[in-house]
Amino acid sequence: TNFHSLSVKNSAVTPSLYHTSREATSSHASYTVTSEPRDEANNLRPRTLVIQSPDDIIINNDIISVKFDRSTGVIQSIQNIDEGGVILEIEQRYGFYTAFSNENSREPEKEDSFNVKGDGMCLPGYINAEGDEMPWLLGSANKWQNAGAYIFRPTTPKESLHTLSPKVPGSVLVFQSNLVTEVHAEFGELGQAPWIKQISRIFHGKNYVEVEYAVGPVPIDDCVGKEVIARYSSSIKNGGKFFSDSNGRQFVGRTLGNHSVFGKDVSLDIEPVASNFYPVNTAMFIEDDEHSFSVLVDRSQAGSSLSEGSLELIIQRRLLHDDSRGVGEPLNETDIGITPCPPFGDATRLGSGVIVKGIHLLKVGKARSGARIAREHMDQVFSRPHMFVASSSKQDQIRLRQLAEIGLKSPLPQNVMIISFVGLEEDDSFLVRLGHQFDDDESVDFSFPVEIDLQDLFPNKSIHSISEKTLSGNQDLSSWEQRRLSWDKTFRERRRKGVVNKASSVVVLEPLEIRTFEIIVK
């Protein structure tokens, strides 16, 4: 294991530390970080550039080239040089949908046998409808169903996005070093202070744009809740079709206005905006015969493609009414907290709205390659390295001790990820999960079965035994397969190859397969 000592130079802005590491997937690295006086002659010091050029800002790292608006710092296009120089024009916007609320919902005009409503005495707009889904499906909830923790519902069914204007500063702020270039931008309503800040980063040797956003406090002076959106519009002709992942694994095709989702008897005209949002756990993309565009997320969000060539994601919510689905309070998080609920208090929120930060990775590729370009970094975004921090005085001498049993004998194939590597109660016993990162037909290079030698995971030990487990790891796979229900199979089942050679500890992973092993070493 390599140990590194880094220094952060004092700066007029909040310092950010960037470091490129070549550590192996299951390895670790230790660093000491110290503060030193500014050294103007040190070329590693971040350089602040104030752009006053009449031309647009173009940042190039020899893999991608990104164009920014010179007056706002907003992304205008991304070119992937490694993908044949494909260029995609992008219009980047932030905005919000206003949240539906019905202050008069305590006395609805019409009762029905499927809807037993309470007296609404708990919170504004509250109706005792927890567990009662029939009114929503039948349409009677149109009169009373508020937006809330469980319900995304714009004020009007076909509400357009309320876009926020990018701030036009005297000059665009750009930070540049030999590892990364940052372009800063801010967004807000005209005549008001901006409440969304964005940093776009282009890293040396990387084929994506990292967009870090800070949202908040979301203004509620108008007494209206807001669903905050990041929207990326392009020239891609996706015909209303987009793809989102299912728990970070298989991509599922989505179609705008697909009536089969909720059943043929339920019209999506009731909520044409809300009904077209789907879970996005790690990535979503659109593609056509010329371009592909993927957005990777660092947390689960809701996403859609409501207009041709666009992708939009909900990045923050601040709502002022309860949706009567069990939470019992509005989704209005503040930085101090809340007073006690009735009868001990009035459940008043204290402080300002919270500020949330998140990251989107933007990737552009060739025709029909959306899944492939997303797969390359999905697991890296989802499973970021764990960081542990401690402090000491500058005079203390910190002894960095090397940990045992960490590392790989040789690198894993590029389409394989270690999902779990857990020491069990018994000495020298480990639970290991390996996952294939690509599905069928997603990549000409990586959508194929791949062999892994489990011995490579234990460079300082030899394997004594290997037992394949079910995905949860609580029973032997062979025992479970003998007891499982035998279905009348009319579909093609992948052939499980198991351990190719038990003496050599080599196993095979099929595309998008996860396999779990209990391994005893000696």
Image (spheres, rainbow, N blue to C red):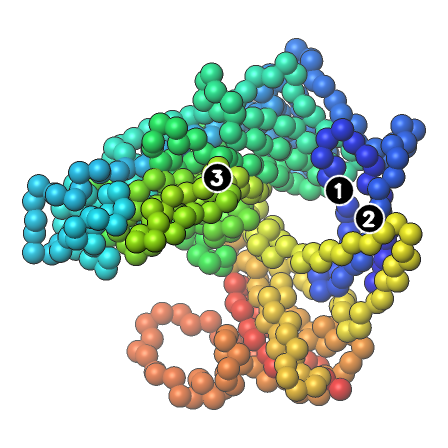
Mark 2 surroundings within 10 Å by alpha-carbon count, few (fewer than 14), some (14 through 19), many (20 or more):
few
| Residue that numbered label 1 is attached to | 17
Residue 264 visible at all: no
Residue that appears at 44% across and 57% down = 246
First in sequence: mark 2 or mark 1?
1
Q: Nearer the viewer, residue 134 or 430?
A: 134
| Residue that numbered label 2 is attached to | 33
How many angstroms separate mark 2 from mark 1 (CA)? 9 Å
SS class of the residue under badge 1? Answer: loop
Residue that appears at 79% across and 27% down = 47
Badge 2 amino acid: Val
| Residue that numbered label 3 is attached to | 351
- State which mark lies toward you, 2 or 1: 2
Badge 1 amino acid: Leu
- State the image quarter where residue 331 is shown: top left
Badge 3 amino acid: Gly
